[in-house]
Image (cartoon, grey):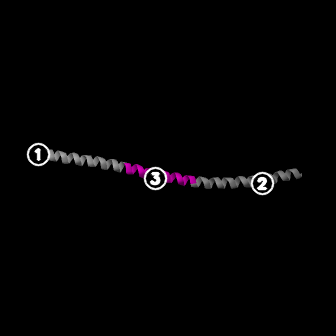
Amino acid sequence: MNNYKKVINDFANLLQTGILAAKDIKQEGINILKFKIENIKSRFNISSKEELEILNKKIDKLNLEIKELNNLIRKR
């Protein structure tokens, strides 16, 4: 009977350790995914800033062209 209790106790400890390990693995997986998501978000922010700068340059160029055209119209 004593051996039976020991076997059940060892099995319960093993099961408990396995459950805790599974929870730790799950949490580590969640942390890795969060890190990758943040990394991707930062990449998109950088590219969107670059795109915004390019668009601002194009707008400035178009505004300059509009001013030049307005000056030509006024001279006529």
Q: Earlier in the sequence, mark 2 or mark 1?
A: 1
Q: Which residue is mark 1?
A: 2
Neighbours of disc 2 within 10 Å: few (<14), some (14-19), many (20+): few
Quarter of the N terminus within the rendering:
top left
Percent x, y for residue 12?
22, 45
Stretch in magenta: 27-45
Q: Residue at x 36, y 48 (%)?
A: 26
Q: Amino acid at mark 3?
A: Phe
Contact flag, marks 2 and 3 (Cβ < 8 Å): no
Task: Give the residue at x 38% y 49%.
Answer: 27
Q: How far separated are the C-alphas under marks 1 and 3?
A: 49 Å
Along the horizontal axis of the image, is 12 left or right of 31? left
Amino acid at circle 2: Glu
CB under 8 Å between callouts 2 and 1? Answer: no
Nearer to the camera, 27 or 55: 27
For disc 3, the neighbor class at 10 Å (few under 14, some 14 to 19, many from 20) is few
Q: Is residue 57 above or below residue 19?
A: below
Which dot, 1 or 3, sits closer to the camera?
1
Q: Which amino acid, mark 1? A: Asn
Q: Describe the element under mark 2 as helix, strand or loop.
A: helix
Q: Sequence-wise, which precedes: disc 2 or disc 3?
A: 3
Which of the marked residues, 1 or 3, is nearer the chain's N terminus? 1
Give the labeled residue for mark 3.
Answer: 35
Q: Secondary structure at mark 1?
A: helix
| Mark number displayed over residue 65 | 2
Q: Residue 75 or 14: which is nearer the viewer?
A: 14
